[in-house]
Image: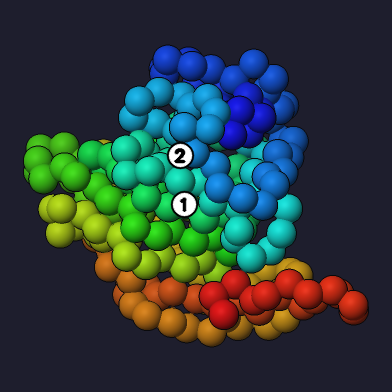
């Protein structure tokens, strides 16, 4: 956990800040396994990782989302404030047991541009029921002018917003015009351009009904790598 924290968690709003930051546009590769605050440094009591104007890639070393960021039902997993001149891409990561007022899994704002590829959001919760503030998005909350999120081949299950507003996804339209798009296509290196549709998602403020989508990885000859979602 400490190695990942020190590469990506650069926001100075929290108690602890990374000391070996990757440069914007670089890549941080996570080893397969569980990442928890009780096994290493986190940003603070309420946040696991907080990024500020950080672009680049944060990805698992494998394609089956076995790199698990576990909020332990105590913290928001990832807080993304802006991405600078680059996009932030999150790939094959499981966001698990996140807990926050809103965006238990991930909170994206400040004009951040984020791609979420082949991730899992499971058992994340938003606790706020105050309609005067953001009060939804068990797994994902997107807010503020310019925030743009594209989601591919990502599974969301078992998430909860206490307000009933977007157990899976909450798009806050009170200020600015943020967007989140749940795509039904699979980028390379997956075997089909069209993803397999799964269960409907519970969302708030999205214009169209959204679903879980499954993409099938092409294993190189002689290697074994289970399909995400199988």
Residue 95's disc is: 1
User: Is there any visible trace of residue 106 in the rendered image?
Assistant: no
Residue at the location (32% across, 65% down)? 158
Find residue 60 and report its horizontal and vertical position in percent.
67, 52
In the displayed structure image, the side of residue 135 where residue 115 appears, left or right: right
Q: Is residue 160 above or below residue 217?
A: above
Residue assigned mark 2: 78
Q: Quadrant of the C terminus?
A: bottom right
Position of 230 with respect to 137 (left or right) is: right
Query: In the displayed structure, does residue 204 sit left or right of residue 180?
Result: left
Does residue 21 lie above or below 127 as drawn? above
Q: Residue furthest front?
A: 39
For marks 2 and 1 on the same chain, the one whose residue lies earlier in the sequence: 2
Label 1: few (<14), some (14–19) or many (≥20) C-alpha neighbours in 10 Å? many
Snapshot quadrant of residue 194: bottom right
Q: What's the residue at 63%, 24% (across, down)?
A: 6
In the rendered view, would you say 223 is above or below 151? below
Estimate the x, y position of residue 185 in percent, counting from the top left.
59, 75
Q: Nearer the viewer, residue 156 or 35?
A: 35
Tell me: 183 left or right of 141.
right
Give neighbour class at mark 2: few <14, some 14-19, many 20+ (Cα, 10 Å).
many
Q: Secondary structure at mark 1?
A: strand
- Residue at image position (70%, 47%) is 31
Nearer-the-camera pick, 40 or 85: 40
Q: Is label 2 or label 1 in front?
A: 1
Residue at 40% of width from left, 23% of height from top? 44
Q: Are dots 2 and 1 in contact, CB under 8 Å?
A: yes
């Amino acid at each position: 956990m400490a190695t990942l924290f020190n590469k990506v968690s650069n926001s100075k709003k929290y108690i602890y800040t990374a000391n070996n930051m990757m440069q914007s546009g670089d890549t941080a590769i996570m080893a397969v396994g569980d990442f928890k605050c009780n096994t290493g440094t986190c940003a603070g009591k309420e946040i696991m990782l907080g990024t500020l104007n950080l672009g680049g890639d944060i990805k698992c070393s494998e394609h089956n989302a076995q790199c698990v960021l576990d909020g332990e039902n105590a913290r928001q997993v990832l807080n993304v404030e802006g991405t600078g001149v680059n996009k932030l891409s999150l790939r094959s990561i499981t966001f698990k047991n996140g807990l926050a007022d809103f965006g238990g899994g991930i909170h994206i704002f400040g004009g951040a541009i984020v791609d979420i590829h082949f991730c899992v959001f499971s058992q994340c919760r938003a606790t706020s029921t105050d309609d005067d503030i953001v009060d939804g998005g068990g797994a994902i909350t997107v807010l503020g002018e310019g925030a743009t999120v594209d989601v591919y081949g990502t599974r969301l299950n078992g998430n909860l917003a206490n307000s009933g507003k977007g157990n899976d996804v909450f798009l806050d339209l009170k200020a600015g015009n943020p967007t989140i798009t749940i795509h039904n296509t699979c980028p390379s290196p997956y075997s089909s351009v069209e993803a397999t549709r799964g269960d409907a998602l519970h969302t708030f403020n999205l214009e169209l009904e959204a679903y879980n989508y499954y993409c099938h990885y092409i294993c190189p000859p002689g290697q074994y790598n289970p399909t995400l979602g199988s």
